[in-house]
Amino acid sequence: MRIDTSKRSEAPEIMDDFSLEGEILRDALDKIAGINRLLGGNKVTLQGVEYLLKIKSADNSSTDEITILDVGCGNGDMLRALADYARQKQLNFKLLGIDANQFTITHAAQLSLDYPNISYRCSDIFEEIKQDSTYDVILCTLTLHHFKDEEIITLMKGFKASSALGIVVNDLHRSKLAYYLFTGLCFIFGLNQMSKDDGLVSILRGFKKRDLQSYSRQLNFSTYILKWKWAFRYQWIIPTI
């Protein structure tokens, strides 16, 4: 089968059905989080948060509350990693995860019962960015690829308007090698068919460096950081302070 990575795919993913629920979805959410953690994905997002905190005004102390919104939070693994980091560094993080699937949100909340500074809400992100809410940092980890180009422009405009410090995007590099390597990971980690099919589509819906540079031009981002990271993903940091 010939794989074309010249343009972003618009093929749907099974998980884009926000009414989806059940054990297959729960298994997929947990396996995706586990693979992301194992391959260093959480570290990519955490590094972005650390960068934004470093450029924060010097007169802000560790006791100041830092509000962080995680868009498309999945099972909440990234938020729990942030809460653990905040505890270790004695930082005051207030963490909110949103997802459009109620089953996903319920599962994430159940896994986060020991984290009082994490809350969750089932919400449509396009409605969320219309609100007056402001967060210090907005995270988008393995979520942006679910949207079409024009939707990404709308979302990023909304994120910029709603973030006091900045935005951290961590998402997939669209690559033939990544596609073929993922098929091997599916076997190694025993991913169910939905996870396998969605994972392959996700890679084809991912990004080339030129895509993210094009979005940055359209959005008039004068300052941003764009780096390739292992395993086959891009770290896109946009300070808004």
Image (cartoon, grey):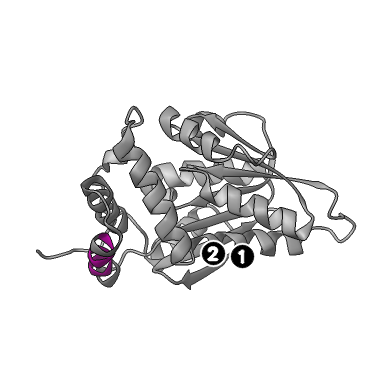
User: Is 54 situated left or right of 185 in this image?
Assistant: right
Check disc 1 and report the residue beneath it: 47
Give the distance between the C-alpha atoms of the residues marked 2 and 1, in whole angstroms. 5 Å
Q: Badge 1, how many Cα within 10 Å: few under 14, some, many 20+?
A: some
Q: Nearer the viewer, residue 69 or 6?
A: 69
Q: Quadrant of residue 199?
A: bottom left
Residue shown at 53%/40% (left/top)? 111
Q: Which mark is residue 37?
A: none
Q: Are marks 2 and 1 in contact (CB under 8 Å)?
A: yes
Residue 184 percent coordinates (x, y): 24, 67
194 drawn magenta? no
Q: Nearer the viewer, residue 223 or 39?
A: 39
Location of residue 165 in the rendering, given as x and y in whole percent from the top left corner: 71, 52
Residue at the image position 55 percent from the left and 64 percent from the top: 43
Residue extent of the magenta highlight:
179-186
Residue 241 appears in the picture as rendered: no
- Element under disc 1: helix
- Count of marks, rendered view: 2
Q: In the drawing, what numbered circle is on residue 44?
A: 2
